[in-house]
């Protein structure tokens, strides 16, 4: 795995980040530790978790593993925002909850700092000044190295960024959005903002939760056993998402490119996202070491321009005003220097 800069920071991270949402859920502690060891052996140094994954178990599993590592070698990201208990303030981005959440994450992770603390989603109730002032203080106190954001809209991220700049606070350096061949609306506003601001993009669900591997041959109502959809109680949700002509076309195209390249479907879908503008590191999700080894095989080679074009075309979504070509031309027509 190659290294990439985390946005405009001086920190280097592996081009694949290991997501740990499956830890304590589909991967027990021993298998999670095998996955972590394999990832590091392959040159990975970047881990993503959240305080709510498996109700904190994911962080505990990482903490037990981290205790045996050289802490400085790992770039560790976690998140706070979602419900952690029954109390009315056990969620959100208030100073009260954030400070509590970080202390609890550090305890579970058995470390005295996290490298990247991400707000997991927008909080409509807490003023941005309260959230980002608290995050700034956490960096100043050394409990957090960098601040990141997940699941914000473009205007929300830009507003937070400008607030930090105006106050001289530490700025968010990364965005963790859903982004894949399936989820390309992310490109409209968020990716162009990240390119303009030098923000690191860390796509979550780069394989559409596993759907883009093409293994759901008989649809989501007859999923292969031992898969996320088979274990979910909400086949309807997945049917609404994936059972349509566009997604069928994407999967067929990924499979065709896989055949051409001699790579697997998962490797093709991951290679496509690895090379999108502003993307620093897609966040892998795996339930075992075999999946991990296969997914790491997405690095070290490139799709051809034609293959990328056919994947782009198959996954295109209808672009309307204000993102369509016509609107872009209106913005730039008389303001171009040749
Ligand atoms: N910020 C957020 O709101 C947010 C939301 C979601 C996720 N995340 C982060 O993003 C990470 C990745 O998300 P994700 O798990 O949804 O990613 P994903 O890559 O879209 O899906 C991962 C799933 O695909 C299947 N899979 C992976 N590699 C495979 C292979 N080689 N062959 C066959 N199946 C394979 C596995 O599921 P099965 O074995 O069950 O089929 C695996 O759990 C998470 O761990 C988390 O860190 C963040």
Image: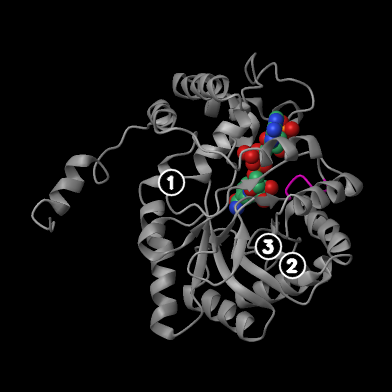
Q: CA distance from mark 3 to mark 1?
A: 22 Å
Q: Which mark is residue 78?
A: 3
Secondary structure of the residue carrying tag 1 is helix
For residue 44, above or below residue 89: above
Q: Main secondary structure of the magenta part?
A: loop
The answer to whether residue 330 is left or right of residue 67 is: left
Examine the rendering and report whether any part of residue 332 can be seen. yes
Q: Secondary structure at mark 2?
A: helix
Q: Nearer the viewer, residue 234 or 60?
A: 60
Q: Nearer the viewer, residue 290 or 338?
A: 338
- Answer with the quarter of the image where residue 259 lies: top right
Residue at image mark 1: 186
The spot of residue 119 in percent (x, y) is: 58, 64
- Upstream in sequence: badge 2 or badge 1: 2
**Mark 3 / mark 2, whichever is N-terminal:** 2
Q: Residues within 10 Å of mark 1 (few under 14, many from 20)?
A: some
Q: Which residue is disc 2 drawn over? A: 73
Q: Secondary structure at mark 3?
A: strand
Q: Is residue 267 left or right of residue 129?
A: right
Residue 30, given in percent of the width and then of the height, sits at 91, 47
Q: Residue furthest top?
A: 218
Q: Image height check: is 318 above or below 105?
A: above
- Tag in front: 2 or 1: 2
User: Does any atom of ligand 1 lie closer than 8 Å to the CB of label 2?
Assistant: no
Cα distance between the residues tagged 3 and 2: 16 Å
* Nearer the camera: disc 3 or disc 2: 2
- Locate residue 229 relative to residue 29 in the image: left or right: left
């Amino acid at each position: 795995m190659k290294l990439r800069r985390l946005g405009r920071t001086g920190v280097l991270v592996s081009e694949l980040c290991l997501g740990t949402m499956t830890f304590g859920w589909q991967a027990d502690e021993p298998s999670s530790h095998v996955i972590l060891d394999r990832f590091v052996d392959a040159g990975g140094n970047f881990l993503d978790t959240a305080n709510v994954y498996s109700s904190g178990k994911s962080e505990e599993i990482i903490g037990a593993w981290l205790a045996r590592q050289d802490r400085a070698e790992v770039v560790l990201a976690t998140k706070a925002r979602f419900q952690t208990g029954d109390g009315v303030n056990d969620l959100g981005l208030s100073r009260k909850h954030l400070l509590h959440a970080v202390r609890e994450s550090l305890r579970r992770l058995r470390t005295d700092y996290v490298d990247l603390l991400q707000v997991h989603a927008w909080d409509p109730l807490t003023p941005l000044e309260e959230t980002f002032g608290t995050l700034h203080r956490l960096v100043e106190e050394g409990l957090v190295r960098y601040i990141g954001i997940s699941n914000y809209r473009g205007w929300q991220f830009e507003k937070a960024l400008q607030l930090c700049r105006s106050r001289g606070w530490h700025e968010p350096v990364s965005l963790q959005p859903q982004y894949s061949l399936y989820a390309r609306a992310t490109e409209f506003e968020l990716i162009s903002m990240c390119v303009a601001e030098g923000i690191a993009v860390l796509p979550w669900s780069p394989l559409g939760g596993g759907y883009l591997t093409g293994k759901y041959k008989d649809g989501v109502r007859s999923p292969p056993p031992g898969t996320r959809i088979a274990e979910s109680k909400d086949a309807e949700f997945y049917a609404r998402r994936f059972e349509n002509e566009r997604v069928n076309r994407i999967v067929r195209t990924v499979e065709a490119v896989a055949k051409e390249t001699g790579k697997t479907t998962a490797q093709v879908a991951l290679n496509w996202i690895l090379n999108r503008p502003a993307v620093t590191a897609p966040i892998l999700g795996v339930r075992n070491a075999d999946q991990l080894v296969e997914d790491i095989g997405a690095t070290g080679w490139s799709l051809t321009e034609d293959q990328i074009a056919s994947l782009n075309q198959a996954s295109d979504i209808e672009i309307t005003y204000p993102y369509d070509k016509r609107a872009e031309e209106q913005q730039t027509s008389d303001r171009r220097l040749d």
